[in-house]
Amino acid sequence: MSSLSPFSVVILAAGQGTRMRSDTHKVLHPIAGRPMLEHLLDTVDRLGAERRVVVVGKGREQVEKALKHHDALIAVQEDQMGTGHAVQQAEGALAGFDGTVIVLYGDTPFVAPETLDAMRDRLEAEDRPGIVVLASCPPDPGAYGRVILGDKDRIARMVEFRDANPAERAVRLCNSGMMAVRSADLFRWLGKVGNANAAGEYYLPDIVMVAAEEGRFAVAVETDAWQTAGVNSRRELAALEHEWQQRRRAQALDEGATLIDPESVWFSFDTRLGRDVTIEPHVVFGPGVMVADRAMIHAFSHIEGAIIGEDAEVGPFARLRPGAVLEGKAKVGNFVELKKARLGVGAKANHLTYLGDADVGAGANIGAGTITCNYDGFFKYRTQIGDGAFVGSNSSLVAPVSVGAGAIVGAGSVVTRDVEADALGVTRADQKSLGGWAARFRERQQAKKAK
């Protein structure tokens, strides 16, 4: 594909998305923990697009804010007058560009890089088609525009569903709206598109007919339906999330992970799993998780922004928040939460523990009910626990504080000062026993209750 001409993309994101019933712009709704628009931009970036033009309209402020960290140009469609009109707004941003333009949609995030390359390749084939249209056969063609083929992959005509006759509606090959066209042709043909249709809009697919009037032809490249699936409602968003998760689960299994109940495991767009990882049911991965070889993730764990080392063990019912690191053979058990905390090799926190802003040394043991008190209402502070230290159950470590290597903290202690290496740190009031007090207390209370 290296011999292909340079290409740029125009991403349409000007639609109002009223069926989403949301204050969030449609293309910014996430799938697998990432906005749809960013999924698409990642694909484009991987292919090396020369320019990326995003056409915005209503809600443009949200989209422009989301694009601040991307190398993208903005074009504005003030009035919603159809897809053809929207693409025209990108002409200024593409001034001086002489190559292939691929038109994409911000709410259709999962077109594959290989598919876009196939479109570019077909546009530059020896027979030199004028337009390449991406098409698919979805299980329910619904109201998609139809692609009517002539000889081989050549398009005889394309028609919007609302303008199609019964025979045309019976065709299953549907227009995705995505297409590849040479820049010089694209904007010349768009200038000739009219709006004599049921909606009174300027349709991008109509350039196929305009090109035909010049003796140029269009072809269709067919791909899987999931690559052309778009989102116009919450139901469609959920369906696309489900489709993405199904494919990601299959990938995890194919790459050597064990999913006990695949349907109940939810991945993020960037989850990375090593070989022989085992994941039990009802595990959720948020963004930024790396799991090394042979790690075990028990049921009902939620993991985000965490690194889990080789042979480490998590859960059940554990929560790892951003900045959590488990080194090799470390273990966190049931109802343990970590945030910006590192457990060294073989360190353990087996039960009912919160470790925030903490470094726990290799082989250390954190008893049940232990917490690091890392926040004073204004600032966060760190706790340091040395190699081989033992922190007894129900202890509170008030940061900033350190427990030295090999030290022991007695159960129930509130540690406010450093404990030196190999020392015993204990803060506990002397236990007292008052004979007969409990019996006298019950008698008094029973008498009160009887009145």
Image (cartoon, helix red, strand yellow):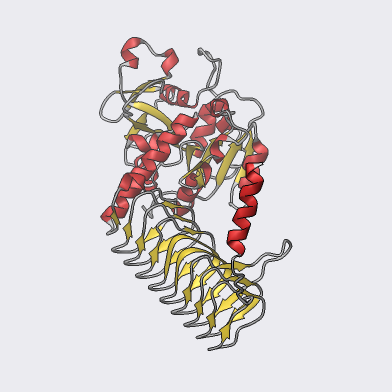
Q: Is residue 261 above or below residue 177?
A: below
The residue depicted at 55 percent of the width and 48 percent of the height is: 51
Quarter residue 153 falls in: top left
Q: Is residue 68 above or below residue 57?
A: below
Tell me if residue 121 can be seen.
Answer: no
Q: Is residue 327 above or below residue 183?
A: below
Question: In the figure, is residue 4 to the left or right of 90?
Answer: left
Number of marks in the rendered image: 0
Question: In the figure, is residue 23 to the left or right of 156?
Answer: right
- The residue closer to the viewer here, 451 or 334, is 451
The residue depicted at 40 percent of the width and 34 percent of the height is: 239
Residue 306 at what x, y percent from top left?
48, 62
Q: Quadrant of the C terminus?
A: top right
Tell me if residue 62 can be seen.
Answer: yes
- The residue closer to the viewer here, 114 or 290, is 290
The residue depicted at 43 percent of the width and 79 percent of the height is: 363
Question: In the figure, is residue 125 to the left or right of 271?
Answer: left
Residue 264 at what x, y percent from top left?
36, 45
- The residue closer to the viewer here, 57 or 287, is 287
Residue 316 at what x, y percent from top left?
40, 57
The residue depicted at 41 percent of the width and 20 percent of the height is: 143
Q: Residue furthest top?
A: 166
Q: Residue furthest right?
A: 378
Quarter residue 79 falls in: top right
